[in-house]
Image: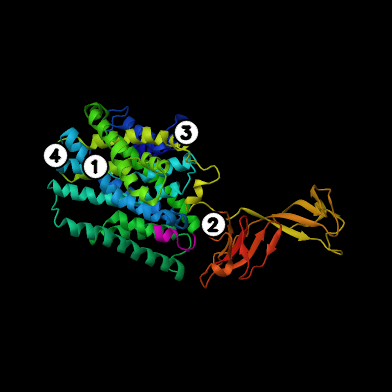
């Protein structure tokens, strides 16, 4: 028992180091997690024997629940909604088209049976959210035309479609009754969305309108609700991953208390889930079996990367007048990863009889995809002139904090003020504040301890942002040119009845706004919510 605990700790520590130094190797950290798993596996240094696909399926499925939930929870809807239609088409129709084209190519060139070919296409049809998110963040890949939001929403939402196709493919091979395919698709999609919305509404209501959850237990409560959502979705025969993703989207973009605490918590949970999935996948792999499937895996990777994925992307995005450059980048960003291998594990755990080594084929395709496509994605973005140097990719995630850590305050010194004719060092400043400059007529004076304050001066203070008490909902919002409030009058915003814009900080001015006040780029809006 003790040895096992030490081993788990060692694995986590090694994966943390791999994440830290992955940039120096020029490849995504997730692929290094796989290699660590292989080093610990049967063909590795420690030779840990592990081939229990049923246990692996259960562990990976639980981990994938939280990856899917956080994918939705951390998606900033106000930016994603502009690309939502395109993202949804890519994550549904695009996944199906990719699966069908890949299946046809496997049938023609690899001579798999039609049912087996469909299964390969289904398992490999989705892009991997963990890989895409990791590369966008790690490389600070700021992309033009809303491409970052498009990739995040598509990769975060397409696993449910791939999962559904995989279940249908398993049914084709007789591992379970495929039943009425049309009804299965209907129940998977419609019931999945309905369950996700239901649990999201209940969760938001409890967190906003009741005191049922004690402060400090918000994240634990959220874990319970996510697991309940997944469980009920499974009971009613819907798509469990779709349910938790929809729940994440709605809850993550709702005004709930302690969201700032939950975001880093779930970021850590998701990181741990990714570590366990990729390590476990490496542990399950037998490197000595990879050469036997290398040619098949390479051909399938080429099918996916150069034919199936681009065909789906161009067919769906060109009607929206997306540029060829954007279509090429979105095609290249279709990374295969953890989800595909988890679905392959599900196929094997189901007992379906497949004539080829599905797990190692999918494992190698994912390895090639993350290693080649993932490593070259930043270079491809630059080559296609799709990098936006003025944007910040972090703003497309909910964990980007718009609140400023400090703010500036102007303090006018009239005659007779108790600061008049005193040195800065002798003045009793508000706790945590610092006098950084004095505006005196047209002169700007950088203050020192021996700087004298005169009547008529404007003393500019740096003060910490106000941290409201638990029952208060004050928030400072930084307005950039992409913010939906920019260049709009407050009366046009149609704010909820329980929200008030109390103040606007504009340069050195503190404005008390009214309905006619127009919010400008660079403003800091203080909102009471």
Q: Which residue is mark 2?
A: 483
- Picture quadrant where residue 480 is located: bottom right
Q: Secondary structure at mark 4?
A: loop
Q: Secondary structure at mark 2?
A: loop
Q: Which residue is mark 1?
A: 101
**Front position among marks 2 and 1:** 1
**Front position among marks 3 and 1:** 1
Give me the C-alpha separation between circle 4 and circle 2: 52 Å
- Looking at marks 4 and 2 on the same chain, the residue that comes earlier in the sequence is marked by 4
Q: Given contact means CB atoms under 8 Å apart, are the residues at marks 2 and 1 in contact?
A: no
**Front position among marks 4 and 3:** 4
Q: Nearer the viewer, residue 511 or 303?
A: 303
Which x, y percent locates residue 247?
37, 59
Give me the C-alpha separation between circle 3 and circle 2: 32 Å
Give me the C-alpha separation between circle 2 and circle 1: 40 Å
Tell me which residue sits at (13%, 39%) in the image: 113
Which x, y percent locates residue 362?
26, 37
Give me the C-alpha separation between circle 1 and circle 4: 14 Å
- Looking at marks 1 and 4 on the same chain, the residue that comes earlier in the sequence is marked by 1
Q: Which residue is mark 3?
A: 23
Mark sitting on residue 113:
4
Tell me which residue sits at (62%, 55%) in the image: 522
- Give the magenta range: 249-258
Give me the C-alpha separation between circle 3 and circle 1: 34 Å
Q: Residues within 10 Å of mark 1 (few under 14, many from 20)?
A: many
In screen coordinates, is 367 left or right of 521?
A: left
């Amino acid at each position: 028992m003790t040895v096992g605990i030490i081993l788990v700790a060692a694995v986590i520590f090694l994966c943390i180091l791999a994440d830290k130094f992955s940039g120096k190797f020029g490849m995504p950290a997730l692929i290094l997690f796989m290699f660590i798993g292989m080093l610990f596996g049967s063909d590795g240094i420690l030779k840990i024997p592990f081939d229990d696909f049923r246990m692996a399926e259960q562990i990976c499925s639980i981990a994938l629940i939280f990856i899917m939930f956080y994918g939705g929870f951390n998606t900033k809807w106000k930016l994603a909604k502009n690309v939502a239609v395109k993202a949804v088409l890519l994550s549904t129709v695009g996944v199906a088209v990719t699966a069908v084209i890949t299946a046809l190519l496997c049938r023609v060139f690899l001579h798999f049976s039609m049912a087996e070919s469909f299964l390969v296409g289904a398992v490999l049809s989705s892009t991997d959210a963990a890989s895409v998110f990791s590369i966008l963040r790690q490389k600070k890949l700021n992309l033009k035309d809303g491409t970052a939001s498009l990739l995040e929403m598509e990769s975060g939402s397409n696993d449910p479609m791939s999962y559904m196709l995989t279940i249908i493919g398993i049914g084709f091979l007789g591992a379970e009754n495929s039943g009425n395919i049309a009804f299965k698709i209907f129940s998977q999609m419609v019931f999945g969305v309905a369950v996700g919305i239901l649990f999201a509404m209940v969760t938001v209501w409890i967190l906003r309108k009741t005191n049922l959850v004690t402060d400090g237990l918000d994240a634990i409560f959220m874990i319970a609700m996510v697991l309940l959502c997944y469980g009920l979705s499974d009971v009613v025969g819907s798509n469990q991953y779709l349910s938790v993703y929809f729940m994440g989207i709605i809850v993550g973009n709702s005004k709930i208390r302690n969201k700032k605490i939950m975001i880093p918590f779930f970021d850590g949970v998701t990181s741990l889930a990714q570590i366990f999935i990729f390590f476990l996948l490496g542990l399950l792999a037998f490197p000595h079996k990879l050469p036997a499937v290398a040619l098949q895996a390479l051909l399938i990777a080429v099918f996916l990367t150069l034919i199936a994925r681009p065909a789906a992307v161009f067919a769906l995005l060109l009607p929206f007048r997306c540029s060829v450059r954007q279509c090429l980048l979105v095609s290249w960003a279709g990374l295969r990863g953890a989800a595909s291998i988890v679905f392959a594990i599900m196929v094997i755990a189901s007992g379906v009889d497949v004539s080829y080594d599905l797990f190692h084929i999918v494992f190698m395709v994912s390895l090639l995809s993350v290693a080649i496509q993932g490593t070259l994605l930043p270079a491809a973005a630059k080559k296609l002139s799709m990098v936006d140097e003025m944007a910040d990719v972090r703003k497309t995630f909910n964990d980007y904090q718009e609140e400023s850590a400090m703010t500036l305050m102007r303090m006018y010194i009239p005659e007779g003020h108790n600061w008049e004719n005193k040195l800065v060092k002798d003045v009793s400043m508000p706790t945590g504040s610092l006098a950084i400059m004095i505006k005196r007529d047209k002169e700007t004076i950088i203050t020192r301890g021996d700087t004298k304050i005169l009547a008529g001066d404007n003393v500019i203070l740096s003060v910490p942002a106000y941290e409201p008490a638990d029952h208060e909902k004050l928030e400072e919002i930084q307005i950039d040119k992409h913010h939906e409030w920019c260049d709009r009058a407050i009366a046009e915003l149609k704010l909820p009845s329980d929200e008030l814009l109390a103040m606007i900080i504009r340069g050195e001015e503190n404005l008390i706004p009214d309905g006619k006040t127009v919010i400008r780029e660079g403003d800091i809006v203080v909102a009471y919510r």
